[in-house]
Image (tube, helix red, strand yellow):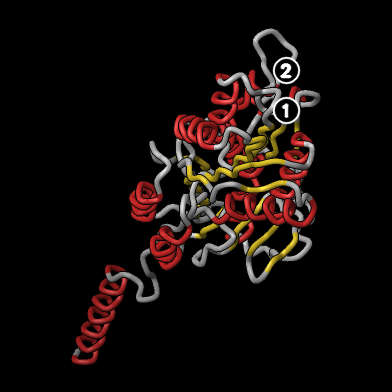
């Protein structure tokens, strides 16, 4: 009897154990975590759009309007947000706050055409310290920049203008030289190149005044030219440096009726010289005899292209090819000044080939 009772108790205990095991969750069974589909990859960050700004000497004149066209076109072709700004007056002090504001905006690159490189050095250093690439143009003496790009050897360009001035003057007589700014390195290199050419090749010519400053203003050039005509009745030639110089000089010469006696040459554009460059078409008087220039649209593109190459870690130096006409085989001068070969000289016979 006791044995039967013991068996019954044992059976009941086993039944309770089996029941408990059936109710408890399996120890090895863990909740499943949902996973992302195998085809879903983490999203990639989109490439940051680069912002380049070209800061010019003065906004709203033909020269820099043409440069703006080139900068905008280059930007579209290269996927860069490239724009151009400048002060209302040709004044280095007015360029400084513009650059300060662009530093605050954290632009990627600045292409600067300084009114006075010395005055802009501190703010350009600040830009470079902020990690902004700085490329200058018409400023081979700029200290704080990654590179300076010149369209050509500036003294050779000025000598080319002097050769044309000398031809018109018959290689003799009095002349004067205008510059946009006495602080402009480029304008003074052109002027000095011309003066040196005159002394070396045309001893019967004489410069009768120091360089005359016009602040890139055609009206000032006009007034200064009238003063020269009054002070030097035997004057036979003018050489201008700012793009607006020959427009003011030519106007004064035309008003005096001296276009056949006085030769006027200088750096400018056909659109600025306008009617003064053509002696044989209606009202066109020929008060301006020849101009030299480089295409500012192409120069603007070249300046921005160098900035892009710096950002992309491309090597730049002797023989660099920017892939831009006039800038295929750059000459390196010193550590970081680059010369192209983009000079153009025109007169009434070929000015129409350059409709800007």
Which quadrant of the rendered structure holds the C terminus? top right
| Residues at marks 2 and 1, CA–CA distance in whole angstroms | 17 Å
Q: Is residue 251 visible?
A: yes
Task: Assign a secondary structure to mark 1.
Answer: loop
Q: Which residue is nearer to you in this view: 137 or 4?
A: 137
**Residue at x-position 63% and y-position 37%:** 238
Query: Taking 155 as reference, is 115 left or right?
Result: left
Query: Which circle marks residue 354 in the picture?
Result: 1
Which one is in front, 25 or 76?
76
Q: Nearer the viewer, residue 255 or 113?
A: 255
Q: What residue sits 74% from the left and 53% below the top?
A: 197
Q: Is residue 327 above or below residue 217?
A: below
Nearer to me, 351 or 311: 351
Which marked residue is nearer to the observer: mark 2 or mark 1?
2
Quarter of the rendering containing residue 301 = top right
Q: Are marks 2 and 1 in contact (CB under 8 Å)?
A: no
Residue carrying label 2: 279
The residue depicted at 67 percent of the width and 52 percent of the height is 195
Disc 2 element? loop
- As drawn, is 197 to the left or to the right of 214? right
Label 1 crowd (10 A; few <14 / some 14-19 / many >=20): few
Count of marks overlaid on the render? 2
């Amino acid at each position: 009897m006791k044995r039967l009772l013991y068996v019954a108790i044992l059976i009941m205990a086993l039944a309770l154990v089996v029941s408990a095991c059936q109710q408890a969750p399996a120890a090895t069974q863990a909740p499943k975590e949902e996973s992302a589909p195998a085809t879903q990859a983490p999203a990639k960050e989109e490439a940051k759009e680069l912002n380049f700004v070209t800061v010019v000497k003065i906004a709203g004149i033909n020269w820099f309007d043409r440069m703006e066209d080139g900068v905008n076109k280059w930007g579209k072709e290269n996927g860069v947000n490239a724009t151009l700004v400048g002060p209302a007056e040709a004044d280095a002090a007015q360029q400084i706050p513009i650059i300060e504001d662009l530093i605050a905006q954290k632009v990627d690159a600045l292409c600067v055409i300084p009114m006075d490189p010395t005055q802009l050095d501190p703010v350009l250093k600040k830009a470079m310290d902020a990690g902004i690439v700085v490329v200058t143009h018409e400023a081979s003496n700029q200290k704080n920049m990654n590179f300076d790009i010149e369209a050509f050897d500036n003294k050779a360009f000025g000598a080319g203008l002097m050769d044309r001035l000398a031809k018109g003057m018959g290689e003799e007589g009095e002349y004067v030289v205008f510059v946009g700014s006495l602080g402009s390195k480029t304008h003074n290199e052109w002027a000095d190149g011309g003066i040196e050419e005159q002394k070396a090749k045309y001893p019967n010519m004489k410069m009768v005044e120091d360089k005359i400053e016009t602040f890139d203003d055609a009206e000032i050039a006009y007034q200064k030219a009238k003063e020269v005509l009054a002070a030097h009745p035997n004057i036979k030639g003018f050489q201008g440096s700012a793009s607006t110089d020959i427009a003011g000089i030519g106007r004064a010469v035309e008003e005096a009726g001296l276009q056949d006696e006085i030769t006027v040459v200088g750096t400018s554009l056909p659109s600025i010289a306008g009617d003064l460059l053509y002696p044989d078409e209606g009202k066109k008087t020929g008060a301006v005899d020849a101009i030299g220039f480089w295409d500012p649209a192409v120069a603007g593109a070249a300046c921005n292209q160098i900035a892009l190459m710096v950002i992309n870690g491309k090597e730049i130096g002797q023989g660099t090819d920017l892939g831009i006409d006039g800038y295929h085989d750059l000459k390196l001068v010193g550590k970081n000044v680059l010369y192209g070969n983009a000079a153009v000289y025109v007169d009434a016979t070929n000015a129409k080939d350059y409709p800007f």
